[in-house]
Amino acid sequence: MLCTSCGVLVGVNDETCYNCGRRNPALWGWAPALRELGADLGFVPFVIGTCVLVYILSLISSSGIVGMSGLSLLAPDTRALILFGASGAYPVFVLDRWWTVLSAGWLHAGILHIFMNMLVFRQLAPSVADMYGAGRTVIVYIAGSLGGFALSSFAGAFLPALPFLRGAPLTVGASASIAALIGAILAYGHRSGSTTARRYASTYVLMLVIYGFIFPGIDNYAHLGGFGSGYLAARLLDPLKPERVDHIVIALVCLGLSLVSIVVSVLQVVVMVSG
């Protein structure tokens, strides 16, 4: 069957690919089935589906109290966002919900918010998966949420507000992780010397900056932290080396912890209310 990294023929039981050096290139015989999911191994539809599900649940939990105009169209209320794991200075440093730096990336503050984020994510993620492989793409994506919301929460609690750059008392959205994907593309351009990748990433960076200036409420600290975390993680993962099986394992652990953080957020509130 075909090596999952470079696509050359390998044996089912080969320990390494003779062409690219990937360990266990046939993935215990599951390579053909996994290839049917695409280069991202189903990560793109998984993220979109999960974000939509959490968004719907947050609307239901709002008990009819939702925004109905402008950028706040169909926006869950603050209590629902905190319930499912919104991050920011207040949840992290007042409520001690430090794990929300992982859960906040699955929440959105309105129908336009989730639509724009998922649209950009759908454009970027397949390109990153082609460059890094599915496992390393997941790692970069989760690292962006961690770094972006950690920086925004810290800035909201301890740094003075600056024009267009202020920490958030409450923040949600996949844009920190999306910024990490942009950082990963730029890292690939620097590592490989690809001017196309650098220009592609620079275009999206410019878009982030413009949006940050034009639209009120944009969490530019989260974008900055996500971008930096994605770039750093991508350089450490080295896109010019083949993806390894342990990258897939690490990715599954990161993804699992991120999803568990939503469950922990809900359970903590439920326990507090029932107690």
Image: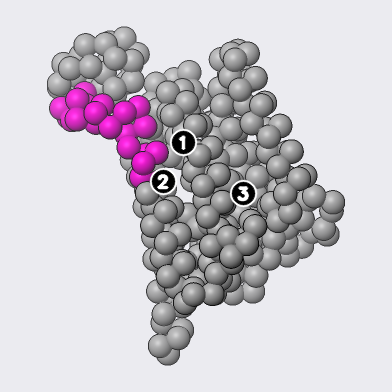
Residue 63 vertical position relative to residue 216 in the rendered view, above or below: below
Residue at 64 percent across and 39 percent down: it is 228
Q: Is residue 82 something that shows in the picture?
A: no
- The type of colouring in the image is one colour
- Assign a secondary structure to mark 2: helix
Tag of residue 122: 1
**Callout in the foreground (2, 3):** 2
Q: Nearer the viewer, residue 216 or 95?
A: 216
Residue 128 vertical position relative to residue 115 in the rendered view, above or below: above
**Residue segment shown in magenta:** 26-48
Q: Does the magenta stretch mainly form a helix, a strand or a loop?
A: helix
**Mark 3 residue type:** Gly
- Assign a secondary structure to mark 3: helix
Residue lying farthest front? 69
Q: Tell me if label 2 and label 1 are in contact, CB under 8 Å.
A: yes
Residue 203 vertical position relative to residue 267 in the rendered view, above or below: above
Residue 206 is situated, as x and y percent measured from the top left of the image, at: 71, 32
Residue 28 painted magenta: yes
In-image side of 221 versus 7 (left or right): right
**Mark 2 residue type:** Ile
- Assign a secondary structure to mark 1: helix
Residue at 84 percent across and 53 percent down: it is 162
Q: Which residue is mark 2?
A: 48
Q: Which residue is mark 3?
A: 148
Marks 2 and 3 sit apart, C-alpha to C-alpha, by 19 Å
